Amino acid sequence: MNATNGFTPGHSYFEATARQRLQQILDAGSFREFLAPETVEVSPHLAALDLPGAFDDGVIIGAASLGGRRVLVAAQEGRFMGGSVGEIHGAKIVGLLRRAVAERPDAVLLLVDSGGVRLHEANAGLIAISEIMRAVLTVRAAGVPVLALVGGSCGAFGGMGIVAKLCSAILISEEGRLALSGPEVIETVMGVEEFDSKDRALVWRVTGGKHRYLMGDCAELVEDDSAAFRLGALEYLDTHGEPEPSLFTLRAVQQHLSDRMVRFGAYRDGLEVWADLGVAQPQQVPLLDRDSLVALKKGLPA
Amino acid sequence: MKLNNLLDALFPAGHTVTVTDQTLTGTATTAAGPVTVLGTMDGAAISHDIALRLADCILQTIESAPGRPLVFLVDTSGQALSRQQELLCLNGSLAHLAQCVDLARRQGHASVSLVNEQAVSGGFLSFGLMVDRTYALADAQVRVMDLKAMARVTKIAHERLMELASNSPIFAPGAESYRRMGAIEAIWEAPSAQLLETALVELAKGAGLADQRMTVGLARGGRYLAADVTAAVLAAD
Amino acid sequence: MNLMEKLEFKFPAQAGKTSPITALCGVVGSGNLEILVRTGSDADVCEVSIKTSARGFGEIWQAVLTDFAEHNPAGGTRIFINDMGATPAVVSLRLGQALTEYLGVAQ
């Protein structure tokens, strides 16, 4: 129990199923599912490969309220086929986003827990992710913030790693990971020297929530608890609007990313980045609790 | 196809393109007016540097050439596979590039891409598939992953995948699958100024503003579920 | 080669209350399963359709489901299962959870 955070802990976000996360994050009893499980056929593409599908094809979508705000939500189930995006799964998310453009809710929450494209439906998955990418930007252009929540067992990888970075902001937990190619893929193709995917500590120093937060790639770091994600989302929405897409903003991002490459481009480990950022004892970072790390980041030179 | 031959075929009226580290940027003349030409070559693996160079070119076009169309030439083997690249959040730079293409669209710049050799996965997502209309040459290789690697990861026999690929565009690699599924507008037997200009003229009328790929995929019979599911979500109580 | 096995069962069962909802429990992950329960067409029968990646366990499904139907008010339900190798213990647990959720709304 952490009295300073203002939430009552009790549900590990990492351990929960997608449905449980929604129940735990959203206002009690407010969730109304779109396309309840048996209204959609189980993926025929998986059936063609002799695999049992899931009734919701691994993603739950619907409407709810969050602290009284009207929200549309999508939650990926990381334990079904790695949360991967197939034709039906992707179309559910695109449908939700298009509905957000029509309805203008206060926000869209994407509970991302996915390795990216579902290889069993490769092309359909890739195209679906491209459609999700365009749809996220259209929702944002309509003035509706899209928040990505990352903290499940699959993290946000592949095309969903790109989608997460197209969102207005990312809330990530220490358990969460955010990247493009999985460490196993990099190791398989480039060798274990390049990336030892079994070195869990290394994986988290390169792709994990604390590193992404310190680098500024995620807006907030939260504890591994659904209540913490809820609070983080509410705090973000309380303090941020959704600015119009602008050349000025993208130019600033361009400059920032270019400067980053110059400054950090030669590093191979989060430890080196954190040291460069001004962290006095980088090796302590993995051991710090969430509040300590947030305080640490606030104290770093600009 | 060599870059210069490709450029000559697309822009017989003239082109000035610079190549830096597998990235090309420049301008060209078409019957529909000047265009920005940019993209990748030699099966480039998209890195931060490549993504940022392309993004910068797009932003420059928005800044200094109102309304000028963007023509992307796509030849990528996917994303760079590197710990250093992941450390600095490669997915973020690819997202930034995608966002620049999208901003160009919102600011009145039509965009097309032409896959002339390879288009793979994240590399393809970051710009080739973000444009108003995507085209491919007949022998272009478009895919998520080759079937052998896919067999290893999914643990489904390679022979079984090949068998299914022969009559399912859902995971058969190739531009034709993507055309049938609505992601590629058309396949060009050869690059031609005529085809490009027709595409640009149509886009100048605003044809590319909304993402129509699902509807096209349904009409062509390559993707028959997505459009219905999306419509059902929009109609749900 | 067929990797997935499809099984169909019908059991006599004591009728429970009819419920307006569809209950869904579990996740189709390795060693896990999801169970969907909704109203069936016959008040004294529990009808079950299974898709499973673990072949050859028909007799065990028979035993687990027979036991479930005998000891629960599962009559009048239609049950769909997507399974990826759950143990009998997990299957029984989920069946109980799903039925409880289904009947819970009827009260």
Image: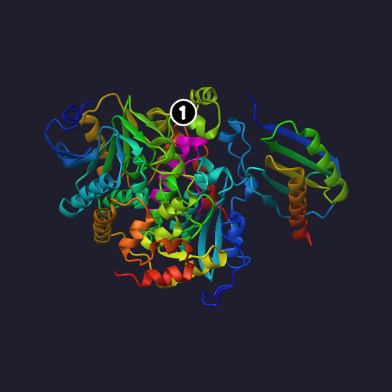
SS label for mark 1: helix
Q: Tell me if C61 is positioned left or right of A93 in this view.
A: right
Q: Residue at x 29, y 46 (%)?
A: B206
Identify the residue under disc 1: B147
Residue farthest bottom in this picture? A3
> A45 and A258: which one is in front?
A258
Q: Is residue C39 visible?
A: no
Q: Position of residue B43 (x, y in %)?
A: 29, 33
- Magenta highlight range: A112-138
Q: Is residue B195 magenta?
A: no
Q: Tell me if C59 is positioned left or right of A241 in this view.
A: right
Quadrant housing the C terminus of chain B: bottom right
Q: Is residue B133 visible?
A: yes
Q: Residue at x 68, y 51 (%)?
A: C24
Q: Residue at x 66, y 32 (%)?
A: C4
Q: Position of residue A222 (x, y in %)?
A: 49, 65
